[in-house]
């Protein structure tokens, strides 16, 4: 037992911790990916809003003056230098009219082949393909927005350029490292390109081909979450993916599994060494303690037997294993069986009328709450019929309570025979009954009136009381709701309608809204 237990702890604990650490790692990577994705999204949205504000105040006449354009661009760049490599304006042919700050070879250069210029000329805000800048010669991310005249026609394009490794743009992507060898990636599925990475060597490199990294392939197709995969370098790693809402990009947080699970491996060696030592110590102690341990177990079983015989009060006993403890388990189950039987009987008494066996007011209230909740959720109707017997007092007072009880049981039986199985018939008072019709549709009123007529019809035949025939009647009040009433409100409405039926001649039904 010691050897098996020791080996079991080594392997089971290692497996358990590996799963636990894996789940924790993936949860942390997911949280980190979400944080970085949100940070990147804020960077992009800040620049988009800046361009939108700038375009809304752009002076179209300034397109005719390079100097005015440079002054206008310089003012915006000095106020809010979001674009680390500045801004420039392109004419409808894609030629750079002016830029700020001025870079060699940028003014006068043609950018009509750039995707962002083409999209902006169509009237759309555009995030361009990350490339090596023609003027800056460093990895950049361009953003462009159309400049329109008062008639809404696109007259030029305003472009902002951010270096991918500038301090105020995507900073968390490059400054965040996970463990010793893990890190972050920013990927554009549309361009199949690594836009940014904690590893500078991967910036603007193409993504792996289809089939190289299965989890990456799923992410390119829209998967967002975390999992374990083999990357393009044939290294097993944890990876979490999170979308950047303002673009079609996504962030990847990754960490090699060997690095994440290193503490589990160290713990496994620690457990092995300590288990060997503990086995030697406890082996001698367990042999001595066996006799001592078995005696209390048998005493516990006898104690359980006395509880089932009623000699001592019930006390809880633990269920352990199938030997001496199995005897204890059997005794405990007998105790539990008796308790459950008593509990079932008490629950039935608490929720049903002892005379007729029908649900009582407490069970009716519970079913009404459930029916009203379903009605409100499913946009259905609930109807309550409040029945009060006409002429019962003469039987109960004149022939005695036993005759009255017998008559009430007969009434309950007759009403039950005309009820649908899914409806509830309850006795809520001396000679008062309630019928709950739930899950009704647009024909709720017709259904309720049909049930009311059936209830009236069962009183057409006399009741046999002490070998004599007595006629009883019933007055019915009906209330309907779509679930917005409380059970108490519905009972009050139907009760008032019932009194209306009595005042109008009895032996009939009335609706609460009449």
Image (cartoon, grey):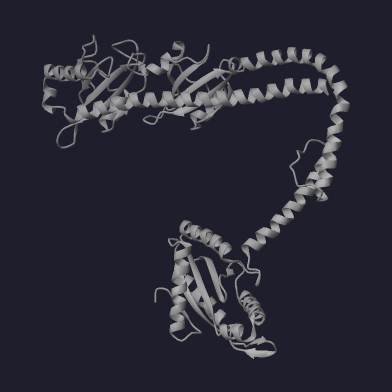
| Percent of width and height locating residue 359 | 61, 66
Which quarter of the rendered picture does the N terminus lie within? top right
Q: Nearer the viewer, residue 311 or 248?
A: 311
Location of residue 232 (image quadrant):
top right
| Percent of width and height locating residue 233 | 57, 15
Residue 122 appears left or right of 334: left
Relative to residue 510, is residue 335 depicted above or below?
Answer: above
Q: Which residue is the extreme one toward the bottom? A: 468
Q: How many marks?
A: 0
Point 60% across, 71% down: residue: 420
Relative to residue 77, is residue 321 depicted above or below?
Answer: below
Q: Nearer the viewer, residue 444 or 150?
A: 444
Report if residue 20 is visible in the image. yes
Point 83% across, 46% down: residue: 306
Point 86% across, 36% down: residue: 298
Point 68% across, 24% down: residue: 15
Residue 79 appears left or right of 191: left
Report if residue 96 is visible in the image. no
Location of residue 416 (image quadrant):
bottom right
Q: Nearer the viewer, residue 61 or 514?
A: 514
Q: Nearer the viewer, residue 229 or 116?
A: 229
Relative to residue 511, is residue 7 depicted above or below?
Answer: above
Residue 361 appears left or right of 278: left
Which quarter of the rendered picture does the C terminus lie within? bottom left
| Percent of width and height locating residue 23 | 58, 27
Relative to residue 487, is residue 435 depicted above or below?
Answer: below
| Percent of width and height locating residue 20 | 62, 25
Location of residue 90 (image quadrant):
top left
């Amino acid at each position: 037992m010691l050897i098996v237990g020791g080996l079991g702890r080594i392997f089971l604990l290692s497996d358990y911790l590996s799963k636990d650490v894996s789940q924790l790692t993936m949860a942390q990577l997911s949280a980190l990916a979400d944080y970085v994705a949100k940070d990147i999204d804020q960077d992009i949205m800040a620049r988009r809003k800046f361009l939108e504000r700038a375009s809304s105040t752009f002076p179209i006449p300034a397109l005719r003056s390079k100097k005015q354009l440079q002054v206008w661009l310089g003012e915006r760049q000095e106020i809010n230098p979001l674009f680390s490599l500045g801004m420039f304006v392109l004419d409808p042919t894609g030629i750079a009219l002016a830029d700020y700050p001025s870079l060699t070879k940028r003014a006068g250069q043609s950018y009509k082949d750039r995707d962002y210029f083409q999209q902006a000329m169509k009237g759309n805000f555009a995030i361009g393909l990350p490339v090596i800048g023609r003027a800056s010669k460093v990895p950049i991310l361009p953003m462009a927005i159309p400049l329109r005249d008062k008639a809404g026609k696109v007259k030029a394009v305003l472009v902002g350029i951010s270096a991918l490794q500038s301090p105020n743009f995507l900073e968390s992507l490059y400054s965040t490292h996970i463990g010793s060898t893990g890190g972050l990636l920013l990927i554009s599925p549309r361009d199949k390109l690594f836009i940014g990475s904690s590893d500078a060597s991967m910036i603007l490199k193409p993504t792996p081909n289809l089939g190289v990294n299965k989890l990456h392939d799923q992410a390119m197709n829209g998967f967002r979450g975390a999992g374990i995969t083999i990357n393009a370098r044939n290294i097993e790693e944890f990876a979490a993916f999170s979308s950047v809402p303002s673009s079609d990009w996504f962030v990847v947080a990754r960490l090699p599994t060997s690095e994440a699970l290193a503490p589990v491996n160290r713990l496994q060696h620690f457990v092995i060494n300590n288990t060997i030592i503990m086995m030697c110590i406890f082996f001698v102690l367990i042999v001595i303690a066996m006799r001592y341990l078995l005696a209390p177990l048998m005493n516990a079983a006898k104690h359980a037997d006395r509880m089932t015989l009623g000699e001592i009060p019930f006390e809880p006993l633990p269920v352990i294993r199938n030997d001496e403890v199995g005897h204890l388990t059997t005794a405990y189950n007998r105790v539990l069986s008796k308790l459950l039987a008593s509990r079932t009987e008490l629950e039935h008494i608490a929720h049903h009328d002892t005379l007729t066996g029908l649900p009582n007011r407490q069970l009716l209230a519970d079913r009404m709450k459930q029916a009203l909740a379903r009605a409100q959720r499913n946009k259905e109707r609930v109807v309550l019929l409040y029945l009060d017997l006409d002429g019962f007092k003469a039987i109960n007072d004149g022939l005695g309570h036993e005759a009255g009880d017998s008559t009430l049981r007969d009434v309950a039986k007759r009403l039950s025979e005309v009820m649908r199985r899914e409806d509830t018939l309850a006795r809520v008072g001396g000679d008062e009954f309630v019928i709950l019709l739930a899950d009704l549709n647009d024909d709720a009123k017709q259904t309720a009136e049909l049930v009311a007529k059936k209830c009236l019809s069962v009183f057409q035949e006399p009741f046999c009381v002490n070998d004599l025939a007595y006629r009883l009647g019933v007055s019915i009040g009906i209330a309907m709701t779509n679930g917005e009433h409380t059970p108490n409100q519905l009972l009050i409405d139907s009760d008032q309608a019932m009194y209306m039926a009595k005042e109008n001649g009895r032996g009939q039904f009335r609706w609460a809204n009449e």
